Amino acid sequence: MTNVYSQKAKSFYDQYQSLTFEQVHRDWLFFLGEKSGLALDVGAGSGRDASALAERSWDVVAVEPAVGLRDMARDATRSQSIHWVDDQLPDLGKIRKLSYRFDLILVSAVWMHISPSDRERAFRILTELLAPGGMLVITLRHGPGDGERLFYDVSREELESFAKRRVLIPLPLPVERKKDELQRDEVSWETLAFRLADDGTGALPTVRHIIVNDNKSSTYKLGLLRTLVRIADGAPGLAIKRTDDWVDLPLGAVGLFWIMLYHPLVLRHQLRQAPGSKGYGFATEDFFKLQSFTPLDSGWECRCRPKLRRWSFALFAPPVVTFSITPRTSQPGRVVTARSLKANPQG
């Protein structure tokens, strides 16, 4: 696919540049307003959209895998605040390594090139690159191919279902299909835009979809999510291993952060789980032996009675607990999933 865009780079460059940014994207520009920030243009092509955003004071990371097209676009935008990267969906591996979070992600005339089997993963990766309050804009091309490039069928309903699972807020845009600006009668377009909620809670957006979508019959699940968010915010370097779907954390770190969070709530402020006298299931006699220590006292494990000391040892022992980034079914052993958020204190 990228070879076609490289081999005919001049033709595609001229075609894209024959239209303006405003012509193509007028449906959602209202939501852009006068603000600026960091934007990601995925499949940036000729650099038309990246250049227009840069003119609006945005800093832009432009992704284009076709070397011929990318070189022409880079030369044309050299004086602007645009950083060009050789990368592509569904992985965006180089972009993810930058650890940026984007206020705007634009995926224009790209989605029809993504294989249906790769789309949910691609959408998840895009949402994970959004900053809180960030906007994701995707255009959908409907119509036959041209004999040179591979096009897949796309649908509004598919994107809306992905957005619902990731708890993105849909923005009100026209639902009818637009005529093709290049006057191709058999081609039409749709635009969908979504926003990631901004509640000022640091890493919470990365697990918001789990909180909203997963079954939570016990409050300890929310407590564990709170612990994971605190680790992600304050100590992300504790992660031993990370893939697209899983994060490995030391079981001791999870236990220690849990105690640091719940020690003041339960032992100092006597916060109850529910009306009545029933307390927390995990707050047994051993937990209340921590009453005389502060949440940050790292030496408490040396001064507790034997039974509690065995629990202390488990906190810092080698076992690793694995957490799923995406909802999955339960797995055996020490695996902790979004649907079964529990760890084995015996290691």
Image (spheres, grey):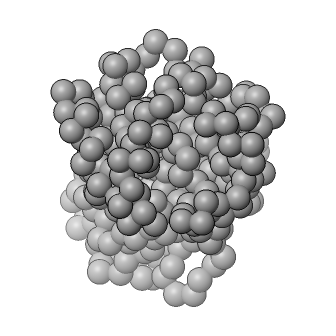
Q: Is 180 left, or right, of 303 in this rendering?
A: right
The residue lying at 59 percent from left, 83 percent from top is: 331
Image location (x, y in percent) of residue 342: 57, 70
**Residue 90 visible from this viewpoint:** yes
The image quarter in which residue 14 lies? top left
The residue lying at 48 percent from left, 56 percent from top is: 125
Closer to us: 216 or 90: 90
The residue lying at 63 percent from left, 33 percent from top is: 181
The residue lying at 61 percent from left, 37 percent from top is: 182
Image location (x, y in percent) of residue 25: 57, 28
Residue furthest right in the image: 176
* Position above or below: 128 against 243: above
Q: In which quadrant will I find the C terminus?
A: bottom left
Residue furthest top in the image: 34
* Position above or below: 273 against 317: above
The image quarter in which residue 76 lies? top left
Image location (x, y in percent) of residue 116: 64, 67
* Position above or below: 253 against 108: below
Closer to us: 229 or 59: 59
The image quarter in which residue 131 lies? top left
Image location (x, y in percent) of residue 101: 38, 41
Total number of numbered discs in the rendering: 0
**Residue 327 visible from this viewpoint:** no
Residue furthest bottom in the image: 332
